[in-house]
Amino acid sequence: MKEISSKDALREQLDDWRHNGDHIALVPTMGNLHEGHLSLVKIARQHAERVVVSIFSYPNHASEIEDAEESARILQRDKRRLVQAKVDALFVPDITLMYPSGVDSATSVTVPILTEEFCGSARPGHFDKVTTVLTRLFGLIQPDAAIFGQKDYQQQVIVRRLVEDLNLGFDVISGPTDREDDGLARSFENQHLSEEQRKIAPELYRILQGIAHSLETGSQNYAELEVGGVEQLASQGFTPEYVSIRRAENLQQPDRDTDELVVLIAASLGEARLTDNVLVHT
């Protein structure tokens, strides 16, 4: 695996691959990799001869890793995992490469409407940072495909709109949510769960499955299902944030003729903010 941190080295490597006719798939990450990220690498390999993983945390990202030695240790662990996954290149740009004009005066990229609900409402400005960083990565790497996990469903829809609106000309591919044996979606947030909370956390997915089953068996009372989901979360000890049934394609409100839905859920459990979703075909 090649480790690249400069624009010139990145361009030289990408040009070499393209000269040989290779396609390039990008898996963007913020590091601290888990099995879910590695599952995306496997999907990337199915769509391109070369796989690039990027590690970059956007400015002011609320990282729990503040100690420099701890950050370095985690990066080394990430590298070992990516070598084992047979990644072709790891791109780790620094802040000056990504923001050559400085963060405060940098050009930003905003996708309106889609970024304002759900996780965007809970974390104002979050998706503007995400779309700005991704656009910079897309410009640097110019991939043939970019791979994202279904767990961050709203982000995936936003990225698809971004790529379409800016005519970036590559495929956005979704990988299924990677789960623990009990159904809990793998996430960095899970490390904040106490032992007792970890036993409760899978209820989030079970509530999603219950709503999905109701939809699949003909229920179209979306508001009632959403309210019921919130009540179930609260009864299990979660602090509910939202339970919402939307059109899978664009997160708009569904009607009775909508045949592809997504059920989105977010709730806090202690210090952990947990999100998940399921797709439903009716």
Image (tube, helix red, strand yellow):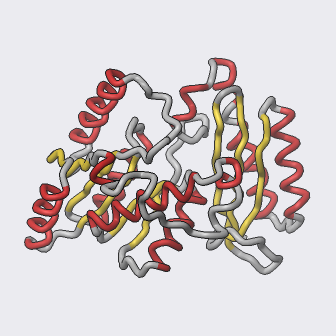
Q: How many numbered marks are there?
A: 0
Establish if 82 lies above or below 69. below
**Which part of the image, by quadrant, shows the N terminus?**
top left
Q: Quadrant of residue 262?
A: bottom right
Q: Residue at x 25, y 36 (%)?
A: 79
Establish if 207 lies above or below 114. above
Q: Quadrant of residue 192?
A: top right
**Which part of the image, by quadrant, shows the C terminus?**
bottom right
Closer-to-camera residue (222/170): 170
Residue 129 position in % (x across, y down): 50, 55
Query: Is 4 positioned to the left or the right of 126 in the image?
Result: left
Q: Residue at x 23, y 39 (%)?
A: 84
Closer-to-camera residue (184/270): 270
Closer-to-camera residue (38/8): 8
Closer-to-camera residue (100/22): 100
Residue 114 position in % (x across, y down): 64, 67
- Which residue is situated farthest in the top direction here? 195
Residue 160 position in % (x across, y down): 50, 71
Residue 93 position in % (x across, y down): 27, 48
Q: Residue at x 31, y 50 (%)?
A: 54
Establish if 102 lies above or below 70. below
Establish if 49 lies above or below 233. below
Q: Quadrant of residue 270?
A: top right
Query: Is 262 positioned to the left or the right of 165 in the image?
Result: right
Query: Is 155 positioned to the left or the right of 80 in the image?
Result: right
